Image: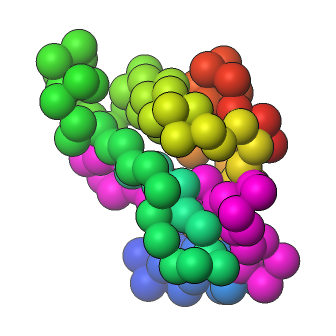
Amino acid sequence: MFKRKDRKVARAKRHRRLRKNISGTQDSPRLAVARSLRHIYAQIIDDQSGTTLAFASSLDPDIKSKVKGGGNIKVARLVGNLIAKRAQEKGIKRVVFDRGGNLYHGRVAAIAEGARESGLEF
C-alpha cells in the first residue's frame, strides 16, 4: 500500500512530466483540472499571456444549487459542462487538456466528458 507522501510525490512527478509537453496558446488554451477531496476545479489558461480565461468549480452557485456535495462524478460532469459554456461565451472552441498529474479516471475523466458534451474540442 502506498503511503500518502509517496502518492503526492508520484502525482507531482507526473504533473512535471506532462507540463513539459502541454502549454496553452491563444488559439488553443489549456484546460487545467485540480481536485481536492471535497471539490473539483477547472480553469482555461492562456500560458503565453499568463491569464485565466474562464473558471468553474464545484463551489459555483450554479452547481451548488443543483446538487448537494462537491466531490463526486456527477458534480464533476456539471463542472465540465459549465467550463465549456463559459469558454464558448469567450469564443474558445479548442483546448488542450491538463489533468494536473492526476490519473485520467473518475472525476478527472468526468470533467473531460462534460466539456466534450458541451462542445469543447480536445
Image quadrant in which the N terminus is located:
bottom right
Q: Residue at coordinates 69% horizontally, 23% vertically from top-left?
A: 119
Residue 66 place in picture, x, y as percent = 23, 14
- Vertically, is 110 above or below 49? above
Magenta stretch: dominant secondary structure: loop
Question: Of 74 and 65, which appears nearest the observer?
Answer: 65
Residue 84 place in picture, x, y as percent = 55, 32
Question: Quarter-wise, where is residue 17 in the image?
Answer: bottom right
Question: Of 108 and 88, which appears nearest the observer?
Answer: 88
- Residue span colored magenta: 18-40
Question: Quarter-wise, where is residue 21 in the image?
Answer: bottom right
Whether residue 24 is in magenta: the answer is yes
Q: Residue at coordinates 53% horizontally, 41% vertically from top-left?
A: 90
Res 103 seen here: no
Image quadrant in which the C terminus is located:
top right
Q: Residue at coordinates 57% horizontally, 79% vertically from top-left?
A: 49
Q: How many marks?
A: 0
Judged left or right of residue 35, residue 48 is right
Judged left or right of residue 41, residue 98 is right
